[in-house]
Amino acid sequence: MSGEPERDPVADSVLAALDRASGHGRSEDGLVRVAIDGGGIPSELTIDSEAMRQTPAALSASILEALRHAHEDLRVQVGQELARAAGAGDPAGTPSAADDAARVADDLDRMAQDMSGEFEMMRCRVFDAIDGR
């Protein structure tokens, strides 16, 4: 015996899928696109040149909107992966998997809100610096 706990192949499969997951979102006007990694951290931000003609407040709102859509996309993927894993596992464990999916969804929502707040603070600092405050 090696003393290490036996690894669950279903859990390993879920963890691997979550490592590969990414969320994608775009603003309603399609001028801003965001990609996030499985941890909810932005990995790509694309801003159409037309969006640069918006007011700073409108541009930041478009970025936050795209980011929220990306987090929602990731949350759906995580929920689907956990549901798939619950179906592959012991039926007695299904309520636990549903609870896990709800906790992960809540965590992703909190992360999105935290990132939105941090982005807004950065935006205010930048515009205050530009205005010389």
Image (spheres, grey):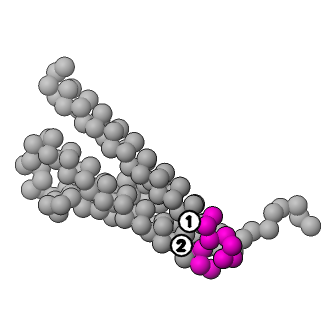
Q: Say how many tags the image has.
A: 2
The type of residue carrying mark 1 is Ala
Q: Looking at the picture, how far across and down is residue 111, in whole percent?
A: 43, 48
Foreground tag (2 vs 1): 1
Would you say the residues marked 2 and 1 are in contact, meaning their CB atoms lie under 8 Å apart? yes
Residue name at image x 33 percent, y 39 percent: 117
The type of residue carrying mark 2 is Ala
| Segment colored magenta | 85-96
Secondary element at tag 2: helix
Secondary element at tag 1: helix
Q: Is residue 122 visible?
A: yes
Return the mark for residue 31: none
Magenta stretch, overall SS: helix
Q: Residues within 10 Å of mark 1 (few under 14, many from 20)?
A: some
- Dividing the image into 4 quarters, which one contains the N terminus? bottom right
Check residue 87 for magenta coloring: yes
Does label 2 or label 1 sit earlier along the sequence?
A: 2
Return the mark for residue 83: 2
Q: How far apart in space, not on screen, are marks 2 and 1 (Cα)?
A: 7 Å
Q: Quadrant of residue 92?
A: bottom right
Q: Looking at the picture, how far across and down is residue 71, in whole percent?
A: 37, 57
Query: In the displayed structure, does residue 102 sit left or right of residue 9?
Result: left
Residue name at image x 67 percent, y 70 percent: 93
Return the mark for residue 98: 1
Considering only vertical position in the picture, is 22 above or below 68?
Answer: below
Residue pushed farthest right?
A: 1
